[in-house]
Amino acid sequence: MIDTLLSVFRISLKAIMANKMRAALTSLGIVIGVAAVITMLAVGSGTQQSMNERFARFGTNILYLRQPWDLDETISSPEDVTMDDVRAIRRVEDVVSAAPYISSGFSVKYGYTSTSIDVLATDTDIFKTYDWEIASGRTFNEHEVDTYAQVAVLGDTVAKTIFNDLDPIGKTVIFNEIPFTVVGVMKKSGQGGWGFDMDEGTLIPYTTGKVKMDTGWKSTSRRALDQVIIRVKDINTIEETKEAITNTVRNTHKIHPLAKDDFQLDDMASWIEQAKAASKTMGILLGVIGAVSLLVGGIGVMNIMLVSVTERTREIGIRMAIGATSADIRLQFLAEAVTLSCFGGLIGVALGVGIALFVANHAENIPAQLSIASIFISFGFSAATGIFFGFYPAYKASKLTPIDALRYE
Amino acid sequence: MSLIETTDLYKTYTIGDVSVHALQGVSISIERGEFVAVMGPSGSGKSTFMNILGCLDKPTSGKYILDGIDVTATNLSKLAGVRNRKIGFVFQGFNLISRTTALENVELPMVYNHTPSGQRRKKALEALEAVGLSQRAHHMPNQLSGGQQQRVAIARSLVCDAPIIFADEPTGNLDTKMSIEVMDLFTRLNKEMGKTIILITHEPDIAQYAGRLVTFRDGQKVSDEVRK
């Protein structure tokens, strides 16, 4: 049995090698399909893993309050999110901390070194909200926030870029012409959060930012915050806490009981949903590309196998004359179709692995994680395509009668 | 019992509204070890007769017993096995499979009866030896002369130890010298290996090699003579 299969496979290989160019072009669709499937699976599982890592680091007990980016048209004069909201939220039960959050990009100078960084204007609650740790020096304090002090806490990467081996503590750096004294440097935290990466950024008191650097901020209102970052104590009662916060903010914004919210309160779960939806969309897109390519590739295989059956009608007749049964002929052509599509599958696997590795190493925004299973799955798809689309030509070949096949010119 | 026994074979083809009566009641019996030449003008039904004897086609009516097997009552997939074990074919156009070495061509019938590959190789080499082509085992058909290709085809017809060889105009594409070589080979297979050979030809000199001459005309056997 194995012996017979080996012979059948050898014959298939020979038939395919006789038309190398044709085989290569025919399997191109399969190549693209398989490569797309592997890339899809790699990006899918990579995204999943990186999301899990991020959420694990951030914790799910963080809430984000902001004015919606796509504000409902029916809300004519939305209230800004301000420090009044922050102060009110801090009084809500189960809220650990609530920090104002205004961020913008600035250039920073020290001596002749300059670089651009994200500056986050906030207050001392930020240190209670996020699990950032101080590496040297200290965080700024409430007194400094209240007195518009020009002090800054640098991220790890920023400190290394500007100061190299120098001790940054006590040095003066210039943000947009305004001098700030470095009071502390944060420990490296790894990839940051949503929109703000502590390693690449700098923290300053929001008061200083609002008053002294006003022209630099995007916001039109002097009081407006980009966001409020809230930490809650108990993840299990997060829904109740969210409701309490919502009511509090509706109160400070003086929203009529029947009117809609003019703000948006998100937790990690909604971020997770959004991120999942995005990665799912990408997965579906790649999946569709893969499926369409495999379909087109499969039709190509079928087409070329039909041509092959016609071209080799006489050969089929000879084989039948010397003892091949219909089943033998069917197996033969099916094996050829499968060999052809598996050949495409192998190249597709190589290409897909190449793309996935390239993406994993070079594209920072698209995490990719290659798994052995995905290689087998996509290769399996190519074999299945061969069987599915090879069946009809093989069936057609097997239905020939030896006498008609031998007479065929 | 005769090796081949046909009774009242009829074959009618219908093409559109026209019916062609290719065979009209042919009865013949051929013994083991005979060398039979079948002659007749084109359209005489000799090829149809040959195809039916070779189990490539079935008669419209009549009975055909081949080595004790009732071919007319056997279904097509079983006939493949009958062809494989009982019959070797040699065609006018050689009908070797291109891009496949002489050796692999000879091995092919054994692929279909699931002979293990080691034994396949051995028997194929023996068959090539028997037709004097062991030196050419690894040549492709297009690297061989017509006579050599026909000898490869003969080796292929021997390899499953089938008792019968059907040769359909085997010298039709060969020059005189090669024809003589091929016919001498058939004679030897008949004499030395006891193969039953049934040869279709329209050349009287080729028919001379056979011990029995059957002539067809208009779908019927018109003469059947045994030479001394």
Image (spheres, grey):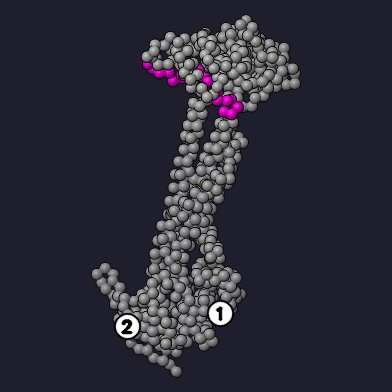
- Label 2 sits on a secondary structure element that is strand
Q: Is residue B103 visible?
A: no
Numbered badge on residue B8: 2
Residue drawn 44% across the image and 68% down it: A325
Q: Position of residue A297 (x, y in %)?
A: 46, 49
Q: Which residue is mark 1?
A: B131
Q: Which residues are magenta?
A: A54-74
Tell us which disc is closer to us: 2 or 1.
2
On the rendered image, what quadrant is the C terminus of chain A found in? bottom left
Q: Is residue A70 magenta?
A: yes
| Circle 2: residue type | Asp
Chain letter of disc 2 in the image = B
Where residue A231 appears, as percent x and y from the top left, is 56, 19
Q: Quick check: is A311 in the magenta stretch?
A: no
Query: Residue B91: image x %, image y %?
Result: 45, 75
Distance from Cα at disc 2 to Cα at disc 1: 37 Å
Above or below, A216 relative to A36: above
The amino acid type found where label 1 is placed reads: Val
- Asked where in the image residue B49 lies, by quadrant, the reply is bottom left
The furthest residue to the top: A147
Mark 2 or mark 1, which has the lower sequence index?
Answer: 2
Q: Relative to A373, say whether A330 is above or below.
A: below
Residue name at image x 43 percent, y 18 percent: A71
Residue at position x 51%, y 67% from top? B98
Determine whether, in the image, residue B220 is placed left or right of residue A146: left
**Are there few (<14), some (14-19), or many (20+) residues within 10 Å of tag 1?**
many
